[in-house]
Amino acid sequence: MNPRFDIARRFVETAKARPGDEAVRGDGLSLTYGECLALATGAADAIAAAVGPGECVGLSIRKSHRAIVMMLACLIAGVPYVPIDPGAPPRRRLQILADADPRLLVVSAGAADDWPEEEFGGLPGLPATLLGDDLRVARRAAAGSAEIARNDLAYVLYTSGSTGTPKGVMISRANAGYFVDWAAAAFPLGPGDQVAQHAPLHFDLPVYDVFVTLVSGGCLHLMDERTVMFPASAYRFLREREITALYAVPSALNSLLQRSGLAEDGLPRLRRLLYAGEEFHVPRLRALVAALPEDAQVANLYGPVETNVVTWEWVTPALLEGDRMPIGSAVPGTEVRLLGEDGVLRSADAEGELLVSGPSVTPGYLNDPERTSRALVPFASDGGERVYYRTGDLASADGAGVLRFQGRRDGMVKTRGFRVELGDVEAAVLRHPQVVQAVVRPIPHAEFGTVLQAHVVLDAGLNTGLTTGLTTGPDGAAPLTPPALRRWLAGQVPAYMVPATVTVHRELPTTSTGKIARSALGGTH
């Protein structure tokens, strides 16, 4: 690996050069670069002694300075980590645990009871000030993975899968390092920058927040889940901390614009705003830009988890006069092509599915070679054959190679900044014993861009009870109401996957071939 792309080495060099500077603020605590380095290197030694080749570390830690230190420690030790959302339903967490099979599972102390099958204790050599009363470690009998060892992974990010099982996107150390190197040059940070860490740590946006900040000498401000949840609290955080750089999804920025003092009082210290994860509708983007300092830079970043950012575009007054923001031009070193219906790759004045090849593209999905072979496909290219990742996104390019997003070719959507397979949500709905058919559709939403709408057919007896107002079904069971189904789903899938509305049908409309007529149910796809 090119030493330039070694995130751990770059962080160590920065920390040694600026030991007294503030590195991380969160939980009411502050760590200097020197303190952060001491904790991370101590933890790295403990991790390296406990984890062997082809093994990984599961991190299910609430957003805190301890979570950041453990991520850095894994990178320093050369051991991949797997962030597991501590707020995810048990089924989801256990699916990820079973697939990744980490040698160590590190959790927040208060969440140890959420893992009843694991035996928690300490880890020899782990700094006492890091473990304290806040972390618990389970040492597990993991089998290890040849894929992990072969691909020299930095981390594995789990995202929605069409079968109802999360899929693990492998990100190599070279993948992550290349992105950090590019982002640090394109959107530089440095000493004096106050950077908000807004997105959940199991998401892909924090790769910029956390690592670009900590290799550049800035200060990382952790926004806890409760602060992020309430726009007024988030806005107050950004004002009080005098944040200079923010990276967030459009739905979160829309909420700030509508439900806080941002539109009236602005963010006077903000000099750079990056957004990604979903399309930002121009009228709202225009209103947001108007609320920011006149010299603030705003950029639209595009790229799925499997590629990180591969195209980008500065938001300019001229572009804000248009109907839709382009997703821009390719990151240097990355090749972006469009696959037409005729199976030919094109790069200019074309439309088609967007394909990506380059140093930030994933080596594949952990323990899923079939899915990997479908997503990473060889095509003839200039100078020979190259492997491209099929994004599933449709785009068009003008003669200068500037790309515009045109929609999806499959059942994948973005909601609240998260990528969701509609089939994943449908599979969850169908697990309810009273649901016999289910279709989930995306519908436009002014604040969140897209929300989900479920259409279901229930067990015949209970459906009759529901539609006729009966309080019980034929066997004495309560009819399943839409609110009850949403509450049940909240225990099965992450909150962003719970449909905003549920509509009960006696039967779903069908096409002439007998298939469900999804378009007749509304939505955007």
Image: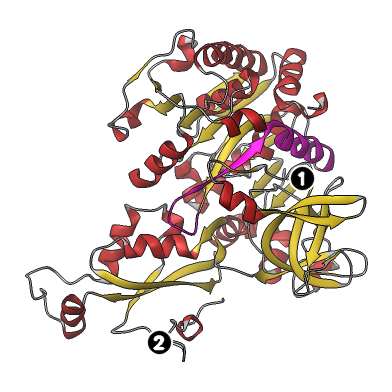
Q: Nearer the viewer, residue 17 or 183?
A: 183
Closer to the N terminus: mark 1 or mark 2? 1
Q: Nearer the viewer, residue 455 or 445?
A: 455
Residue at numbered disc 1: 271
Magenta stretch: residue 197 in it? no
> Which region of the structure is painted magenta?
161-186
- Label 2 crowd (10 A; few <14 / some 14-19 / many >=20): some
Outermost residue to the bottom: 512
Q: Is residue 184 above or below residue 267?
A: above
Q: Which residue is mark 2?
A: 509
Residue 159 badge: none
The x, y position of residue 288, in whole percent, is: 68, 61
- How packed mark 1 is, by other alpha carbons closer than 10 Å (few <14, some 14-19, many 20 or more), is some
| Residue drawn at the location 29% of the way across and 30% of the way down | 117
> Can you see residue 242?
no
**At label 2, which amino acid type do we have?**
Pro
Q: Residue at x 46, y 57 (%)?
A: 496
Residue 314, image quadrant: bottom right
Q: Position of residue 243 (x, y in %)?
A: 67, 40
Please tell me whether residue 173 belongs to the stretch shown in magenta: yes
